[in-house]
Amino acid sequence: MTFSTGGYTSSATMGLTEADTGSSGSSSGGTHVGTDGGTAAEPAPTTGGSSTTTGNLSGAFETLDMSTSGVPTTTNDGPATTDSGPDATTGTSSTSGTSGTSGTTGDGTTGGQGNPPPANATDENLLVALFGDQGTGNNTKAVYDLVLAEKADFVIILGDFDYGDDPDGWASEMESVLGDSFPVFAVIGNHDADAWSGYQDKLKTRLAKIPGASCEGDLGVKSNCTYRGLHFVLSGLGTKGSDSDHEKHLAQVLAADDHLWSLCTFHKNQRDLQAGDKPDDLTWEALQSCQDDGSIIAMGHEHSYARTRTLTDVGNKGASHGATGMAELLEVGPGRTFSVVSGLGGRSIRDWDSGLHDGQSWWASVYTDNYWLKNGVEENNFEAEHGVLFLRFYVDGDPNAAHGYFKNVKGDIVDEFDIIHK
């Protein structure tokens, strides 16, 4: 896709992670003991049982100023190919992220079978892996191994790569597991800023090897990309560049895009939309643009996993950000989105901050060092592990259906949910 705003366009890939450690533990019976020792109500209402009813729904280069003519988007033509990696030894199969009942559309019928897909649909069964806050070493390599085991089609890294300002070392470790041409895209994190030109060069080089990928703008900072029919914005809001410029960019590119599925990806997040105590680093105006478009919001920065229910009023805490519907079934479309933090890429694992977040009704699932909530039901006796959020689009023959799951490196399904685009 091409936008009228001039700029450098190309194709790329990339990877990252980070997290903090804490004491393990959990609660039961609808309440849990927080880190301050007090008892608090669970943060989200239950949804009628502990088992999910979901299943398979089926170098820095800056933007060039080309105000008069612009630069057309460049793509690498040819069939999209990825390194499929070794067969999974644990967990889900390559064709369906998880097992379960067939997914349905909002009216209870499976849609899409037998009908030609719309031109703006993703590839069928497209599987995307998302994680941030990597670090280096065995935990990070285990996350890469999981990506291959699940046979993901590509990766979006949500910032904070190696925490060492070492682009060569970070790229070398990634290549030792994923190879040098596996499709990886990434967004800048605060721990990547000092050596960003080197990281960005690595991403540019990888992008050039991805057939059919297209990215426009300042890659990983203020860019928007399409690959295999999925549209996604890589935004450095809160890390690099002015808030107003990022807000304007998000609003413009989302309004101009007509793909069925779209993601807004950031490293930073808002306190209400993560499990810990990080401050507000994005802006509600930017996230409102994502909601208005029906784009899924994916973030890192906090070293844990946290997913909301469907949100219809992002930024309005007094109305619980417009949280609605079931924990395990989400709806996206104009005016409806959900947000997720996937920050368990290898660095560390942090605690649930009960003092800040207990009683918040918008949570569907949370996975931290001391607290695990799975679709509104608290889980006990666990040891938190690093892992990856997987999103599979166009499932069960329905281009409007998607399936999500978070799997840890031990092969456990930590969270599982269906998504309907309306």
Image (cartoon, helix red, strand yellow):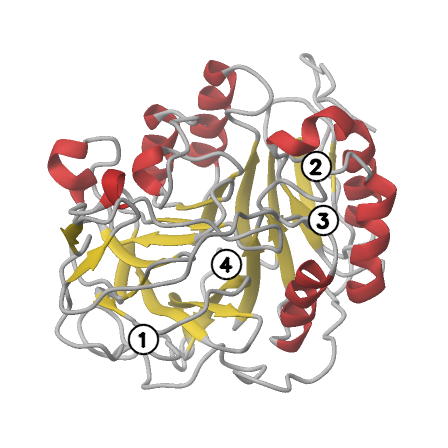
Q: Earlier in the sequence, mark 3 or mark 4?
A: 3
Q: Residue furthest front?
A: 37
Locate residue 236 relative to residue 351 in the image: left or right.
right
Please state which of the two labelled residues, at mark 3 or mark 1, is closer to the viewer: 3
Residue 14 - label = 3
Of circles 3 and 4, which is in front?
Answer: 3
User: Which label is found at residue 119?
Assistant: 4
Q: Quadrant of the N terminus?
A: top right
How far apart are the alpha carbons under marks 3 and 4? 27 Å
Q: Amino acid at mark 3?
A: Met
- Residue 273 lies, in percent from the top left, at 33, 41
Residue 255 sits above or below residue 123 on the image: above
Q: Residues within 10 Å of mark 4 (few under 14, many from 20)?
A: few
Q: Nearer the viewer, residue 214 or 238?
A: 238
Indicate the amino acid at tag 2.
Thr
As drawn, is 201 to the left or to the right of 394?
right
C-alpha gap between disc 4 and disc 1: 16 Å
Mark 2 vs mark 4: in front = 2
Task: Check residue 111 in the rendering and tell me which mark sits there, or answer none.
Answer: 1
